[in-house]
Image (tube, rainbow, N blue to C red):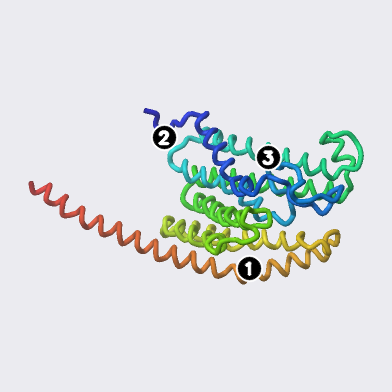
Amino acid sequence: MTSPKHLPLASAALIGVIAALAGLLPWVAAGLQLPLQNLWAAPTLPEDMPFALLPFSQYALPSLFGLLALPGAAVGLALRGRSAPRTRWAAAGGIVLVQAVAIVQTAIVTAGGMRQTGSPTFAADVRSISTAAALYVTAIVVFCAVAAVIGVVALHLAAGTAVPGAAAGLAAGAVAAGFWIRAWTDITGPFSLDPPAVLVWAWQWLPALLVGAILAWSGRRVGAWVGALAILWLAPALLWALLGAVASRVNLGSWGAMLETALITLQGQLVGGLWPVLVAAAIGLLGAVALAFARGARGRSDAPAAGETLEA
């Protein structure tokens, strides 16, 4: 029987591929049609938009982060303590393969719909579209690449580092999990018109619950607590600030207005984001105490048995 520490590289890569495909489920359920684009070359109905493997839209940045960052953290959790470095790299390779195909395919489709002249090739599309459209496509591609890289980093942290590093990787995954659930209710999601209350509650509070569990597992490791709580507090705030900067068509092109909107959004999110941090810290504290008590009780119950064995 194959030892978990010697998982075949092909199997690890397949796990990565499956995780990346699972990460796309909210978008698959939504129909895989590119969202309407402000810079599209011709007026088009939503149902006539082309097939796309990702929801390229400045309004869907939080969802894109969830779709691309969560698979890596989930695989890292699954492989923790049971994989060699090359196994983790193979799993990461499977994730990157699927996500790279999705990003490139969607970039080509988006650029193609915005082209004005030229042959239907990616290079011609990029040369012929307007500067604003080219900047738009490039910015979303870069954002998707960064989200994918964060997922890969989370995989390696969660699977192969000490508790503080693993807690940071898992906390990033917890944040991504919230946005992945939100992708089901986002403007590009299958439940965008009438989102179930349970999904709305889940994407708002699940990251805090997960980080609380991570903190309980971390015990007294201060570095793990600081890192995980900082990620829970700062990462969503920064993402919402970015969305606030680019979501207004009025502000687009005005860097000053975009920066001002981002800073206002960031300030509000940092204040509001303290509640999930407090909830996570409370859960972590209660969980750590409960785990310590359970370990102590188990140790005391084992002591008499050991004494009886010696007497016998």
Establish if 27 lies above or below 251. above
Q: Earlier in the sequence, mark 3 or mark 1?
A: 3
- Name the quarter where the N terminus is drawn: top left
Give the secondary structure at mark 3: helix
- Crowding at dot 3, Cα within 10 Å, few <14 / some 14-19 / many 20+, comes out as some
Answer with the quarter of the image where residue 266 lies.
bottom right
Answer with the quarter of the image where residue 268 lies.
bottom right
Say which residue label 2 marks: 4
Is residue 152 or residue 127 the one in the foreground? Answer: 127
For the residues labelled 3 and 1, say whether their Cβ atoms are less than 8 Å apart.
Answer: no
**Alpha-carbon distance for marks 3 and 2?**
30 Å
Q: Earlier in the sequence, mark 3 or mark 2?
A: 2
Horizontal arrangement in the rendering, residue 146 relative to residue 312 (left or right): right
Callout in the foreground (3, 2): 3
Is residue 52 or residue 209 the one in the foreground? Answer: 52
Q: Amino acid at mark 2?
A: Pro
- Crowding at dot 2, Cα within 10 Å, few <14 / some 14-19 / many 20+, comes out as few
